[in-house]
């Protein structure tokens, strides 16, 4: 099933969904793309991408699986 950002409507990648669940709400029924999430967090998409890499490779977080 295809998920879309509830702000801008972009199709979401699994990493974007995983990061949203990790940072915002584990049981979230809807998600934001990296751009919109960065705006909400006063961050940048690049920094959020770094976070995704951090969780995947350093923490081996179970949300971030390929
Ligand atoms: Zn968006």
Image: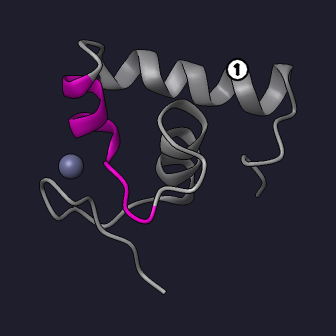
Q: Nearer the viewer, residue 38 or 22?
A: 22
Q: Position of residue 35 (x, y in %)?
A: 24, 36
In screen coordinates, is 66 left or right of 26? right
Q: Is residue 20 left or right of residue 46?
A: right
Quadrant location, the C terminus: bottom right
Say above or below: 9 vs 22.
below
Q: Residue furthest left?
A: 8
Q: Give percent across and percent down for residue 10.
A: 22, 62
Q: Is residue 46 left or right of residue 52?
A: left
Residue 32, placed above or below residue 40? below
Crowdedness of circle 1 by 10 Å Cα count: few (<14), some, many (20+)? Answer: few
Residue 1: give x, y in percent of width and height.
49, 87
Q: Residue at x 32, y 47 (%)?
A: 33
Q: Position of residue 19 (x, y in %)?
A: 54, 39
Residue beneath disc 1: 54
Rendered residue at 83%/46% (across/down): 62
The colour scheme used here is: one colour
Instruction: Say which residue appears at 30% left-offset and 68% top-offset.
Output: 4
**Within the magenta stretch, is there residue 35?**
yes
Of helix, strand and loop, which one carries label 1? Answer: helix
State the extent of the magenta-drawn residues as a range: 29-40
Q: How many marks?
A: 1
Q: Residue at x 81, y 36 (%)?
A: 61
Q: Is residue 33 above or below residue 44?
A: below
Quarter of the image holding residue 56? top right
Q: Is residue 54 left or right of residue 1?
A: right
Q: Is mark 1 within 8 Å of ligand 1?
A: no
């Amino acid at each position: 099933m295809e998920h879309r950002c509830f702000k801008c409507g972009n199709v979401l990648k699994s990493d974007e969904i995983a990061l949203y669940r990790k940072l915002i709400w584990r049981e979230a029924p809807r998600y934001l793309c990296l751009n919109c999430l960065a705006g909400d967090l006063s961050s940048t998409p690049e920094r959020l991408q770094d976070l995704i890499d951090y969780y995947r490779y350093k923490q081996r977080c179970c949300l971030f699986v390929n």
